[in-house]
Image (cartoon, rainbow, N blue to C red):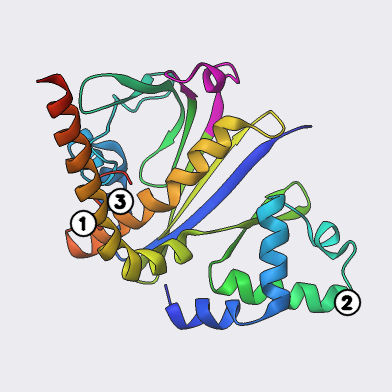
Amino acid sequence: MAKSSFVYVTFIKTTPEQLWTALTEPEFTQKYWFGVRHESDWKPGSPWKMVFKDGRVGDTGEIVEIDRPRRMVIKWRNEFRPELKAEGFSRCVFELEQMGEAVKLTVSHSIEQDQSKFIEAVSGGWPLLLSNLKSLLETGAVMLIEKP
Amino acid sequence: MDDDAVFRALADGSRRLLLDRLHRKNGQSLADLCEGLEMSRQAVAKHLGVLEEANLVAVQWAGREKLHFINPVPINGIAERWIGKFEQPRLRALSDLKRALEKKGRS
């Protein structure tokens, strides 16, 4: 089976509930996601979308699985770059696990396609977002406000 | 995470080679990673353990197979700690310059 995927892990000194809120509340996502709001009612089968500051829709999809505050699976497709949209839906899994005084956050993103351009595009962005998320939760401030 | 563990893990050529291989092709098993290397399987497994401990490698199970993925998040954290501070004003200066020039072009 041809597949492209990545797995990113970060440890954040916070609680699973707080981290869950940071991942699912638009007011919170826009603080570390360069102004992008993640909008959904976070129920299985519900639509999900990423909205830019100027109102344009970036990516869309559907909530596949949701188990607050442990696990969330999103069907995820880019909408604004035709070559990425053509690859169809990817699968993004968030897993939260309490480890001592930190929460281990694992983000795995995959698509059933070899050498996926979509996976290449998103894999570049995640480390920055996760660093921002970590510093926002741990210190109350982000490292980078604008996307470099 | 522990920066010392990250630097210790990176201070070894064999471990950097393993990261290079994962960077080229992500999600490999121990057997995949051993292929074409002079190191013994035990040595590779030990190096992977150190990389995993430092959170530079993340593992996932695909059935009974343990797959290894490069995790660049700690390296990004280190980069932002020292580089981000210098980058951001420069990036802002560039975007200000772009705005100013584009504005000038219109008037």
Image position, residue B104 (x, y; %)? 13, 28
Task: Pick the residue in front: A123 or A140.
Answer: A123
Give the residue number, with chain letter if any, for mark 1: B89
- Badge nearest the viewer, 1 or 3: 1
The magenta stretch is A77-91
Mark 1 vs mark 2: tell me if same chain: yes
Which quadrant would residue B101 be assigned to in this image? top left
Question: Label 2: chain?
Answer: B
Category of crowding for the residue at label 1, using alpha-carbon neighbours closer than 10 angstroms: few (below 14), some (14–19), many (at least 20): few
Residue A145 placement, left or right of A93:
left
Measured from the top left, where is residue A13 in percent x and y? 31, 66
Q: Amino acid at mark 2?
A: Ser
Name the residue carrying label 3.
A19
Q: Residues within 10 Å of mark 3 (few under 14, many from 20)?
A: many
Spatial CA distance of label 1 from label 3 is 29 Å
Residue A70 appears left or right of B27 = left
Confirm whether circles 1 and 3 share one chain: no
- Which amino acid type is marked by label 3? Leu
The quadrant of the image that shows the N terminus of chain B is: bottom left
What residue is rendered at 42% in x and 34% in y? Answer: A66
* Residue A112 seen in this snapshot: yes
What chain is tagged by disc 3?
A: A
Q: Is residue B93 above or below residue A45?
A: below
The numbered mark at residue B40 is 2
Rounded to the nearest angstrom, the CA distance separating label 3 from label 2 is: 41 Å
